[in-house]
Image (spheres, rainbow, N blue to C red):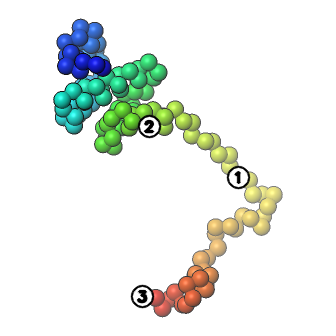
């Protein structure tokens, strides 16, 4: 992190780089183009540190999403990781058999009369 110029020459990274998913190369190229002068590499290293908390498969999903959404940076990837970790709420089917008077809600014809009253005129005449 402190010496981004040494990134290409660090032996552990060179070994790992030969095995990591191709999306990492795409992300690195994107960040280096967006932020030359070392900032892009520092951002990439910060993203690599996310491996401490997340599996590679989840991180790959987050990177792919961030690249397609044009928010490929540490904050965009962290946002997607948070979204992936959230469980979608499960909603049960609402049974209205015990309440027949509610079964037609949303089925009735729309009336513009209430809107006419709110705007103080006849909405049919508005052009």
- The label number, if any, that marks residue 25 in the structure image: none
Which element carries disc 1, helix, strand or loop?
loop
Residue behind mark 2: 79
Residue 22 appears in the picture as rendered: yes
- Counting every numbered tag in the picture gives 3
Which element carries disc 2, helix, strand or loop?
helix
Vertical position of residue 14 compared to residue 76: above or below: above
Residue behind mark 3: 127
Taking the spot 19% from the left edge, 12% from the top edge, the residue there is: 9
Q: Residues within 10 Å of mark 2 (few under 14, many from 20)?
A: some
Instruction: Give the x, y percent position of residue 49.
Output: 38, 21
| For residue 8, side relative to residue 97 (left or right) | left
Nearer the camera: disc 1 or disc 2? 2
Which element carries disc 3, helix, strand or loop?
loop
Q: Quadrant of residue 113?
A: bottom right
Q: Residues within 10 Å of mark 3 (few under 14, many from 20)?
A: few
Cα distance between the residues tagged 1 and 2: 33 Å
Taking the spot 25% from the left edge, 30% from the top edge, the residue there is: 40
Q: Residues within 10 Å of mark 1 (few under 14, many from 20)?
A: few
Residue at the outermost right position: 98
Taking the spot 36% from the left edge, 32% from the top edge, the residue there is: 74
Residue 15 appears in the picture as rendered: no
- The label number, if any, that marks residue 94 in the structure image: 1
Quadrant location of the C terminus in the rendered image? bottom left
| For residue 101, side relative to residue 55 (left or right) | right
Instruction: Give the x, y percent position of residue 26.
Output: 24, 30
């Amino acid at each position: 992190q402190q010496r981004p110029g040494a990134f290409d020459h660090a032996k552990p990274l060179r070994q790992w780089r030969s095995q990591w998913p191709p999306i990492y190369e795409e992300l690195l190229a994107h960040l280096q183009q967006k932020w030359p002068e070392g900032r892009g590499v520092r951002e990439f290293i910060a993203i690599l540190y996310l491996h401490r908390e997340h599996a590679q498969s989840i991180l790959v999903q987050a990177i792919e999403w961030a690249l397609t959404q044009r928010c490929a940076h540490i904050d965009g990837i962290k946002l997607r990781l948070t979204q992936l970790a959230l469980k979608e709420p499960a909603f049960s089917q609402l049974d209205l058999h015990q309440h027949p008077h509610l079964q037609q809600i949303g089925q009735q014809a729309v009336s513009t009369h209430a809107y006419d009253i709110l705007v103080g005129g006849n909405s049919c005449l508005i052009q």
